[in-house]
Amino acid sequence: MNVKRVGNVILAVKDIDKSIKFYHEIIGLPIKQQRRTWVDLGTAGALVSLHPASLTAPHQGTSVENGIMLGFLVGDLKSSIEELKSKGVKIYREPMERDAGINAIVLDPDDYMISLFEPLFKDQTQQTAGYQGFTPA
C-alpha cells in the first residue's frame, strides 16, 4: 500500500443542509464541490465531505460516544470561541492551555466533536507541520 495523504474525512449527517450551513457559513470552510448527496468542503489538504446518513437506519451515536473528532487550526482561539458562541454553536469543552497550545472542543449539528487548536510558539522559529490538537480528556 502506498498512501500519499488523507484525501477527505467523510461525515454521515442527519440534515445535509444544516451541516452545510454549519461547516460553510459558521466555520467558514469553502465549498469545493457540491452534488445533491455529497459536499466537499476545504481548499487544500484533507477535505471534509458531508454525505446524508441512511434514511432507513437510525443515526446512532455521536462522536462523543464513538471517538470521531475533526481538528482545525485557528489563529486566535479566544475570538473563534466567542464568534461560535454568538452563532449558537455548542461548546463541549472550554479552552484549555497545554504545552503546545490552546485547545477547545465544539459540537456540530450531529454532535460530532471539532477540536479547535491555536499553537503556542515559545520559540519564534518553531513551526507546526500539521495539526497538533488534543482529545476531549
Image (spheres, helix red, strand yellow):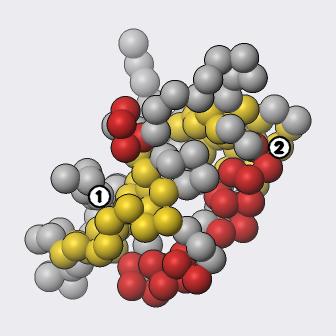
Instruction: Specify whether 9 is left or right of 50.
Output: left
Instruction: Specify whether 68 is left or right of 35.
Output: left
- Is residue 92 visible in the rendered structure shown here? yes
State the SS at label 1. Answer: loop
Q: From the top left corner, tell me how far across and down residue 74 is, in percent.
A: 43, 72
- Is residue 72 visible in the rendered structure shown here? no
State the SS at label 2. Answer: strand
Which residue lies under the disc numbered 2? 34
Residue 7 picture quarter: top right
Q: From the top left corner, tell me how far across and down residue 128 is, in percent.
A: 29, 64
Residue 58 picture quarter: top right
Q: Tell me which label, 1 or 2, sits earlier in the chain.
A: 2
Q: Residue at x 39, y 12 (%)?
A: 1
Instruction: Specify whether 52 is left or right of 64.
Output: right
Identify the amino acid type marked 2: Gln
Instruction: Specify whether 57 is left or right of 4.
Output: right
Q: Is residue 131 above or below residue 104?
A: above
Could you tell me how far apart the alpha carbons at marks 1 and 2 are, in whole angstroms? 28 Å
Which residue lies under the disc numbered 1? 133
